[in-house]
Image (spheres, grey):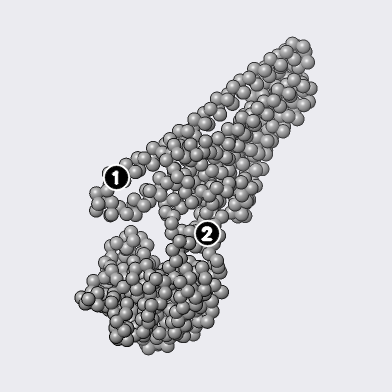
């Protein structure tokens, strides 16, 4: 049935939905580990209100019975005593009803505080876990899908909390209280009817919850697909406009919304069928209990008050049974809604997420002296970088690097060139531990990088990439991202080193200028200078320039290349480039081909060999 619903909704089984099922224990374990002391305290208060309200609601019919019996007795024997009893029973009945209602109205305030706190904690936990996941897991997934997984889970958690506090517990309290009272009536047939009704309700809802769960899973998948498409389209709205692709995108959206609509329709149909069956059970049980109670009154084994009590209890007992059944049904739906998030939480974080600050350096690179001159300040010691027998591939069918050995001496500038797909950028990802090699090891400063805290490693190594990713925030925020908690003075110093300060100062809002979505309000050169400032502000020990100027015009490229060379003087530097003119001054040039080092040497030396490097050079400069 789940496969049919998924097919009907046009939803494919994505990687957010592995086959291992979600268990109730897993749901409860995640809920319990996410709830903090404040959540537990407010839920505890809510449970007290629930128990008290359930007891009052269950005891109210007893006072109604006493009221009816007192009035019946008063009709037969006039006097003050029956009327006093009737008034006392009426007062107790009203107090029980009013108290139960007041507690029920107070409960949403307490549970609402717990819900919002829990949602906040769940969001924090989910976000922290996402940031700790390996890049190999995150890259194939769409951001809209991941974010909507949190929204679905929040809905599921609200269902769990609402039914756990508002349905399951009060219903159990009422049922237990009613069962105890009915046992004292000594009406075996009525007790058997109530028991049979309870069993029928539980059976119907147990079977129905299984079907609801399958339908809810299809709805969840369709909803994830829709939100992923919406997010992708908004992020690439410029591309859609340029290619006049808006009509096609609207058709895609219509297909996905139709799929989601079909999924919800099927879910509501299942819930409707379940409700109709419950209505039949309800009508039959009430009819039977009325017949039995009337027969008991006729045989004088039950008073008129007892008849009223039995009738009211049947109606009152059906309500908590229906609430329990609805809770079972909705909890199954909640588990399906929480499934995508729980699957993400199942994923193992990066091999090491131990965050630790780098050792203190009394003279960090880029620090200013008393005159404020960054160039005259002493530099921190730069480490050597070694790749030893590294083998790596993004999948088992294609190997990118094959037993690669590469030494980058401390304080030297090594350039890496080669054709597209030869593994240049893969070296950067491996160095930062965004991916793990299948074989071999990588050392920084004589230590294997898998023995270093990731936070320390990534503070030592800073990358200026080809395509600068900027947040839709201020220039200060985007530069300061390289050093969380950086002061404005530190941000301005980094901007000066990147030759960006004068440009920013001329803007009306200065460092508080928003850069727009993906930084599109800036030119390519300005975005690259922001990337340089972001790298510089962290005072790195190793610079990696990954095609940092390949998307710029010749004049801007020459300016930024000069800035990069000046900043990295004396630092361990790895420069990855396609344009060979940017690396001809490197201390050594390494040429990669088919995942291995084909040749290495200085620019003039490689040209004299007439090998791959010479071929690349002549092609780029009009030679044969």
> Residue 86: x and y, percent?
71, 21
In terms of depth relative to the viewer, which is nearer, 446 or 99? 446
> Residue 318: x and y, percent?
64, 27
Sequence-wise, which precedes: disc 1 or disc 2?
2
Q: Is residue 210 left or right of residue 257?
A: right
Relative to 598, say whether 94 is above or below.
above
> Residue 96: x and y, percent?
66, 31
Residue 530 in sight: no
Q: Secondary structure at mark 2?
A: helix
Q: Which residue is mark 2?
A: 129
Q: Residue at x 53, y 64 (%)?
A: 350
Relative to 276, say whether 404 is above or below.
below
Q: Is residue 105 left or right of residue 378?
A: right
> Residue 278: x and y, percent?
59, 26
Q: Quadrant of residue 506?
A: bottom left
Q: Residue at x 54, y 70 (%)?
A: 355
Q: Which residue is mark 1?
A: 248
In terms of depth relative to the viewer, which is nearer, 147 or 107? 147
List the single residue furthest toward the left.
Answer: 622
Q: Residue at x 62, y 23 (%)?
A: 281
Q: Quadrant of residue 538?
A: bottom left
The local crowd at label 1, few if under 14, some if 14 to 19, many if 20 or more residues have their Cα within 10 Å, is few
Relative to 418, say whether 305 is above or below.
above
The local crowd at label 2, few if under 14, some if 14 to 19, many if 20 or more residues have their Cα within 10 Å, is some
């Amino acid at each position: 049935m789940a496969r049919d619903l998924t097919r009907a909704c046009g939803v494919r089984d994505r990687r957010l939905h592995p086959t291992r099922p979600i268990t109730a224990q897993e749901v409860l374990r995640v809920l319990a580990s996410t709830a903090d002391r404040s959540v537990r305290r407010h839920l505890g208060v809510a449970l007290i209100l629930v128990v008290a309200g359930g007891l009052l609601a269950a005891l109210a019919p007893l006072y109604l019975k006493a009221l009816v019996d007192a009035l019946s007795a008063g009709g037969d024997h006039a006097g003050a005593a029956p009327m006093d009893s009737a008034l006392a029973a009426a007062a107790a009945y009203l107090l029980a009803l009013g108290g139960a209602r007041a507690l029920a109205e107070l409960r949403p305030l307490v549970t609402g505080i717990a819900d919002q706190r829990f949602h906040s904690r769940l969001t924090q936990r989910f976000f922290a876990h996402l940031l700790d996941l390996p890049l190999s897991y995150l890259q194939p997934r769409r951001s809209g899908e991941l974010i909507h997984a949190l929204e679905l889970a929040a809905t599921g958690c609200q269902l769990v909390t609402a039914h756990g506090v508002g349905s399951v517990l009060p219903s159990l309290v009422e049922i237990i209280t009613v069962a105890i009272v009915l046992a004292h009536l000594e009406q075996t047939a009525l007790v058997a009817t109530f028991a049979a009704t309870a069993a029928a309700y539980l059976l119907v809802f147990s079977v129905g919850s299984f079907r609801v769960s399958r339908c809810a899973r299809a709805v969840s998948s369709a909803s994830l697909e829709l939100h992923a498409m919406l997010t992708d389209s908004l992020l690439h709205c410029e591309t859609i406009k340029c290619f006049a692709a808006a009509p096609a995108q609207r058709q895609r959206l219509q297909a996905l919304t139709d799929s989601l609509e079909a999924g919800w329709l099927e879910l509501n149909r299942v819930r409707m069928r379940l409700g109709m069956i419950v209505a039949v059970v309800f009508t039959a049980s009430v009819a039977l209990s009325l017949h039995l109670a009337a027969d008991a009154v006729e045989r004088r084994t039950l008073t008129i008050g007892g008849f009223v009590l039995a009738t009211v209890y049947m109606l009152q007992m059906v309500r908590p049974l229906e609430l329990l059944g609805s809770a079972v049904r909705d909890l199954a739906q909640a588990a399906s809604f929480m499934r995508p998030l729980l699957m993400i939480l199942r994923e193992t974080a990066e091999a090491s997420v131990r965050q630790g600050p780098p050792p203190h350096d009394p003279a960090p690179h880029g620090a200013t002296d008393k005159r404020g001159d960054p160039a005259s300040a002493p530099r921190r010691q730069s480490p050597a970088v070694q790749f030893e027998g590294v083998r790596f591939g993004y999948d088992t069918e294609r190997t990118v690097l094959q037993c690669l050995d590469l030494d980058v001496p401390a304080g030297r500038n090594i350039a890496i060139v080669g054709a597209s797909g030869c593994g240049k950028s893969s070296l950067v990802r491996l160095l930062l531990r965004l991916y793990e090699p299948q074989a071999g090891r990588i050392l920084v400063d004589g230590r294997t990088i898998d023995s270093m805290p990731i936070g320390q490693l990534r503070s030592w190594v800073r990358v200026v990439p080809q395509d600068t990713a900027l947040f839709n925030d201020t220039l200060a925020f985007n530069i300061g991202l390289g050093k969380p908690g950086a002061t404005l003075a530190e941000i301005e110093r980094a901007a000066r080193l990147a030759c960006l300060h004068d440009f920013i100062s001329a803007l009306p809002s200065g460092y508080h200028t928003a850069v727009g979505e993906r930084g599109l309000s800036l030119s390519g050169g300005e975005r690259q200078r922001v990337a340089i400032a972001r790298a510089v502000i962290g005072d790195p020990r190793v610079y990696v320039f990954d095609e940092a100027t390949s998307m710029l015009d010749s004049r801007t490229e020459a300016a930024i290349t000069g800035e990069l060379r000046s900043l990295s003087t004396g630092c361990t530097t790895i420069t990855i480039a396609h344009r060979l003119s940017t690396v001809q001054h490197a201390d050594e040039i390494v040429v990669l081909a088919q995942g291995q080092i084909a040749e290495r040497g200085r620019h003039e030396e490689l040209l004299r060999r007439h090998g791959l490097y010479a071929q690349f050079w002549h092609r780029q400069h009009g030679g044969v």
